[in-house]
Amino acid sequence: MIYDAVIIGDGPAGISAALYTIRANMKTLVFGLGDSVLKKASKVENYYGFAEPVSGEKLLSEGEAQLKRLGGVILREEVIGIEKEDVFRVKTVNNTYSAHTVLIATGQKPVSIKIRNLKKFEGKGISYCTTCDGFFYRGKKVGVLGFKDFALHEAEELLKFTNDITIFTNGEKTDFTDKSAAGKFAINEKPISAFEGEEFIERIVFEDGSETPVDGIFVAYGNASSINFALKMGILTKEQSIIANSSQETNIPGLYAAGDCTGVFKQIAVAVGQGAIAGKNMIEYVRALAKKSD
């Protein structure tokens, strides 16, 4: 089955876009883990239509109810990759979904990793994109920094280039859905103190004082984010945000972005507005495709 629209993110931008695509009778699928940063807002006082303060969690639940009333579906599956072939392929841990258009509306949920010299070695042995840089580590000793399904996916991607792969969890317990796939890799759960080396990274130093040599580290900490999707797809970015035009379309036709992941003023009203614009233009894009095929 090919969906007309796949929307990644169940926050204000994603739900707003889905309300438009569903009402236009487009086959729409929304992915979300229910982890929008809006949940942390105890009182929202500046959103149109609410005379009294409302919690972020209440706003989110109302949006989800509105979506479901229209027949919308939210899949609680983590998206770990997007590819473009004849159509878009959206990959989760266990499934691949096809779509004519895709909206990235995952917000900006920065994961703070407090490891000394992480920034120092970015681009010098530390990478955030296996698709971009995996080739340079053919036959070398590499590590993946992470502990969830996204890290496991990146480790599997690296098998194209090397078999010497260790997943470093930095003290976190692993949370992998596919236990058998995880068995392909060495896993080190020690807390990391620092990355060290001369010009390029050469070793990992753990908090217990032990060390292990590495040629490269691929960061895949937590869940896949908008910037991870952008790096792999060749989407243009600026300062860790996705660049989208006035139609919310990226430099890749049919691929849209809305909300906080575009680096805009981080307000619910802005996210909802961008989602609406994206939804409208996704509808027009799919209709134009249909006309071409007639």
Image (spheres, rainbow, N blue to C red):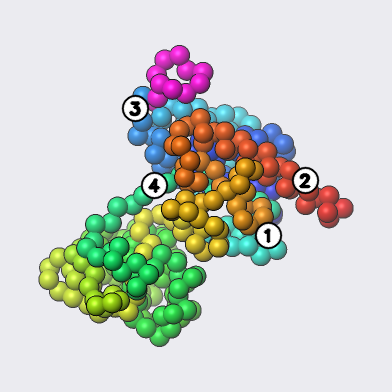
Res 87 label = 1
Query: What element does badge 2 sit on?
Result: helix
Q: Is residue 1 above or below residue 151?
A: above
Left or right of 21 in this view: 174: left
Sequence-wise, the earlier of marks 4 and 2 is 4
Query: Element under label 3?
Result: loop
C-beta proximity under 8 Å, tags 4 and 2: no
Q: Assign the N terminus to one quadrant of the image.
A: bottom right
- Kindly identify which residue carries mark 4: 109
Residue at label 3? Answer: 42
Please say whether residue 266 is one of the residues in the magenta stretch.
Answer: no
Q: Is residue 49 magenta?
A: yes
Image-quadrant location for residue 142 = bottom left
Q: Is residue 233 above or below residue 101?
A: below
Where does the magenta region start and end? 44-55
Three-letter code, disc 3: Ser
Q: Give amino acid for label 4.
A: Lys
Q: What's the residue type where badge 2 is placed?
A: Arg
Label 4 – label 3 distance at C-alpha: 18 Å
Give residue 20's quadrant in the image. Answer: top right
Label number found at residue 287: 2
- Mark toward the start of the polypeptide (4 vs 1): 1
* Residues at circles 1 and 3 in contact by the CB criterion of under 8 Å: no
Reading the chain from its start, which is encountered first: label 3 or label 2? 3
Left of 291 or right of it: where is 166? left
